[in-house]
Image: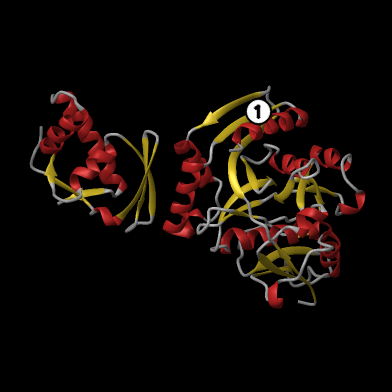
């Protein structure tokens, strides 16, 4: 690949190659301050290739490739190159990660204890994780929670936060504009803008945390909270995992341990202030 | 009730099992499949791990374990569970 960028996020090293310079320039800006992969060796390689023989120059469009590929994936416009790079890295993790059990979740930490925020797309977990990261919590993850089967700890994976639609303005009101990537309009997921986690999240990315609470937020409903039993939690977390099946019995044991030792609840909230209040109240009860 | 068929389950070392509240999480090692079981499914598997049994034998043992009367309805319910477990690959015909 003519243009490339290497970066380490938590315990995982990536190398992203591209046929065009602009996505790599955007990545370098977004991941300013992040370390390089250990020993210079990436765990995963992602590539942004031209979608056809002429597509490098004529109406350029990107095919996401790498160690793992989705052959039927639709190509993306070069204008959305940063999003394509982020999706390419997600793809490598989702298909190739075997050291950690992956949960599609945000994670925040305080005093060495972590809250896992998981749920369906649009639930607000990314926005909540990003907001909490600016309000006294350490931001650990937005896309993937990395559960270590050997220790039961959650390892930080502080990739850039993918903010969608209304969440963009919420975070623009909170943080330094220099931490944002470009505003990407009309992507397949709507309007997107990426946010670099703050300096603390980057500096402490090697510090795992003990999970003490799993929350299922749901945005847009009246304030409500309900506890969730371990059997339902187990079922929902297998659905939230991209590599549970591939991990085999190791994944089963890791998830079984989590649900037997970590309480869970669903929280409905009409606005972020209510969500933050609910989370702080749960935190007060969850701490030993 | 039919009593010609003998059922059997894999020995205990073929499963990884955790109990959570009123359910059992079971990882079936030969298939790599994960199952969530409620009573009497886990009890049925327990009865079949060391020896094969017929439907009537299973019903009789469960009636002692779970304290219910042996009648046609009980037999039908247990037969339905046996069918489900067989489809799931957790028991088989000996």
Q: Is A227 positioned to the left or the right of A20 in the image?
A: left
Where residue A49 sits, quadrant-wise, is bottom right
Q: How many marks?
A: 1
Q: Chain of mark 1?
A: A
Residue A128 placement: quadrant: top right
The residue sitting at the left extreme is: B4
For the point 24% across and 44% down, the residue is B45
Q: Position of residue A10 (x, y in %)?
A: 68, 61
Give the secondary structure at mark 1: strand
Residue B69, quarter of picture: top left
Residue that appears at 81% across and 43% down: A134
Picture quarter with the C terminus of chain A = top right
For the point 28% across and 38% down, which residue is it?
B41
Q: Quadrant of the N terminus of chain A?
A: bottom right
- Which residue extends farthest right? A177
A178 relative to B46 in the view: left or right: right
Which residue was labeled with disc 1?
A268
Q: A123 above or below B87?
A: above
Residue sitting nearer the eye, B89 or A31:
A31
Closer to us: A234 or A55? A234
* Relative height, residue A57 to residue A253 (above, below): below
The residue sitting at 76% across, 54% down in the picture is A201
Task: Give the class, few, some or many, for how many residues have Cα within 10 Å of label 1's Cα (few <14, many ≥20).
Answer: many
Indicate the position of residue A123 as horizontal and vertical percent values.
67, 37
Residue A59 in the image: x percent, y percent? 83, 63
- Colour treatment of the image: secondary structure
Measured as percent of width and height from the top left, residue A73 is found at 65, 58
| Residue found at the very far front of the displayed protein | A288
């Amino acid at each position: 690949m003519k243009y490339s960028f290497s970066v380490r996020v938590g315990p995982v090293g990536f190398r992203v190659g591209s046929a065009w310079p602009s996505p790599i320039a955007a990545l370098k800006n977004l991941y300013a301050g992040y370390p390089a992969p250990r020993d210079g060796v990436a765990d995963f390689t992602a590539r942004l290739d031209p979608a056809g023989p002429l597509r490098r120059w004529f109406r350029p469009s990107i095919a996401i490739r790498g160690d793992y590929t989705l052959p039927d994936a639709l190509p993306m416009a070069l204008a959305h190159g940063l999003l394509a790079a982020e999706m390419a890295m997600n793809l490598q993790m989702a298909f190739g990660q075997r050291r950690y059990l992956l949960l599609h979740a945000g994670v925040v930490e305080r005093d060495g204890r972590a809250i896992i925020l998981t749920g369906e797309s649009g639930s607000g977990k990314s926005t909540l994780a990003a907001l909490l990261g600016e309000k006294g919590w350490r931001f650990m993850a937005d896309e993937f929670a990395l559960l270590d089967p050997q220790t039961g700890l959650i390892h930080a994976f502080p990739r850039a936060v993918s903010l969608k639609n209304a969440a963009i303005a919420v975070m623009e009101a909170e943080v330094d504009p220099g931490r944002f990537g470009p505003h990407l309009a009309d992507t397949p997921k709507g309007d997107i803008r990426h946010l670099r986690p703050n300096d603390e999240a980057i500096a402490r990315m090697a510090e795992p945390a003990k999970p003490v609470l799993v929350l299922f937020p749901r945005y847009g409903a009246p304030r409500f909270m309900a506890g969730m039993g371990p059997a339902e939690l187990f079922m929902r977390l297998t659905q939230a995992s991209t590599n549970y099946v591939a991990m085999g019995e190791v994944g089963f044991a890791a998830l079984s341990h989590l649900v037997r030792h970590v309480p869970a609840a669903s929280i409905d909230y009409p606005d972020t202030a209510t969500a933050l209040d609910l989370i702080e109240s749960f935190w007060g009860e969850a701490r030993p | 009730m039919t009593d010609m068929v003998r059922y059997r389950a894999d020995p205990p070392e073929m499963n990884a099992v955790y109990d959570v509240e009123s359910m059992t999480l079971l990882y079936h090692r030969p298939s790599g499949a994960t199952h969530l079981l409620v009573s009497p499914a886990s009890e049925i598997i327990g009865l079949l791990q060391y020896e094969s049994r017929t439907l009537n034998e299973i019903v009789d043992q469960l009636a002692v374990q779970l304290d219910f009367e042996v009648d046609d309805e009980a037999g039908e319910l247990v037969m339905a569970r046996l069918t489900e477990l067989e489809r799931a690959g957790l028991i088989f015909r000996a």
